[in-house]
Image (cartoon, rainbow, N blue to C red):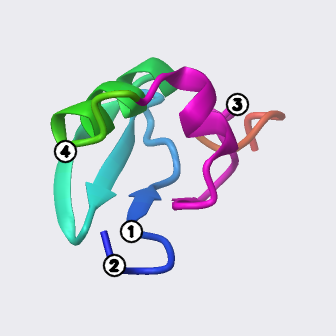
Amino acid sequence: MAATHPVTVYPPDDDGARRVRVDGEILGRAYSVRDVARFLQEAGLQGWDEMDVVRSRLIDWRGGGPGEWTAGGPSGS
């Protein structure tokens, strides 16, 4: 993972899922921080858990941080 932000978590879709991309490859849709941690474990970061995901500077959170899982933001707009 050579890029500044090799992991991108995209904004929530209408179902509350967020696409997760690692090194240019979409790994799937996450519905929680736990799902993001699982994707990163499968990508080779076996020791990572939810707290690592929340604290990591390797992740570019788009459309809200690790606490945002609904489309349109906290107010639903």
Residue 53 figure quarter? top right
Q: Does the magenta stretch include residue 16?
A: no
- Which amino acid does the dot numbered 3 rest on? Gly
* Residue positioned most to the right: 75
Which is more N-terminal, label 4 or label 3? 4
Task: Determine which residue is flagged by label 3.
Answer: 67
- Left or right: residue 73 versus residue 6 is right
Q: What whole-number distance in Å separates the C-alpha atoms at marks 2 and 3?
A: 26 Å
Task: Return the x and y of residue 33 as percentages of the image width and height.
Answer: 51, 26
Which is more N-terminal, label 1 or label 4? 1
Task: Determine which residue is flagged by label 4.
Answer: 43
Task: Determine which residue is flagged by label 1.
Answer: 6
- Left or right: residue 7 versus residue 58 is left
Q: What whole-number distance in Å separates the C-alpha atoms at marks 1 and 3?
A: 20 Å
Task: Return the x and y of residue 76 as percentages of the image width and height.
Answer: 74, 35
- Judge depth for marks 2 and 3 and give the one in front: 2
Q: For numbered disc 3, what is the local secondary structure?
A: loop
Which is more N-terminal, label 3 or label 1? 1
Q: What whole-number distance in Å separates the C-alpha atoms at marks 4 and 1?
A: 11 Å
